[in-house]
Image: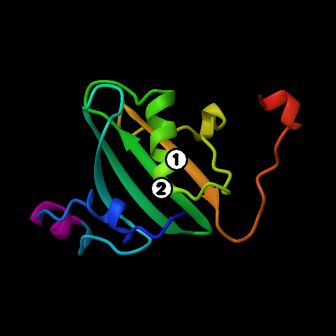
Amino acid sequence: MRNLNAPNIDALRDRSRQIIEHYGSAGDETCGVFDLPSTIDGANLRIIASNGGGWDHVSVSRTNRCPNWLEMEQVKRLFFNPDEVAMQLHVAESEHLSVHPYCLHIWRPNEGAAIPLPPAMMVA
């Protein structure tokens, strides 16, 4: 994941009293809460970024619907480096939890583990 103190990302950081009271700070280079205008309609994408347990992670939500592919791609390109592979997961039903009806996630292992990929011709 990119350094979240980079000016173009840090400028989107939520430094409100509510965030600081909830999390103890506004975050750092590895975590924080951010508000990003969607390139689709300008509506707010709420992003919570974190790094821990061997994973880089961002959750992306909107108030009235799930983010779409273009919005998730917008977030991936902003929060992850161009050479990093990141993924959305569809876990087994028995492990599925949902605490927000309009939230999607992007994950990347940060301990050097590579995400297995199908052959490039199948991904195009």
Q: Is residue 40 above or below residue 81?
A: above
Question: Disc 2 residue type?
Answer: Phe
Residue 31 located within the stretch drawn in magenta: no
Q: Distance of mark 2 from mark 1, alpha carbons? A: 5 Å
Are circles 2 and 1 on residues that touch, CB within 8 Å?
yes
Residue 94, horizontal then vertical, whole percent: 62, 36
- Assign the C terminus to one quadrant of the image: top right
Q: Which residues are magenta?
A: 17-22
Label 1 crowd (10 A; few <14 / some 14-19 / many >=20): many
Q: Amino acid at mark 1?
A: Lys
Is residue 97 visible from the viewing direction of this image?
A: no
Q: Position of residue 82 (x, y in %)?
A: 62, 54
The residue beneath circle 1 is 76
Q: Quadrant of the N terminus?
A: bottom right
Q: Is residue 13 left or right of residue 31?
A: left
Q: Looking at the picture, does residue 75 appear above or below residue 71?
A: below
Position of 17 with respect to 115 (left or right) is left
Give the residue number, with chain letter if any, for mark 2.
79
Determine which quarter of the picture holds residue 40.
top left
- On the image, the x and y values in percent for residue 6 come to 39, 69
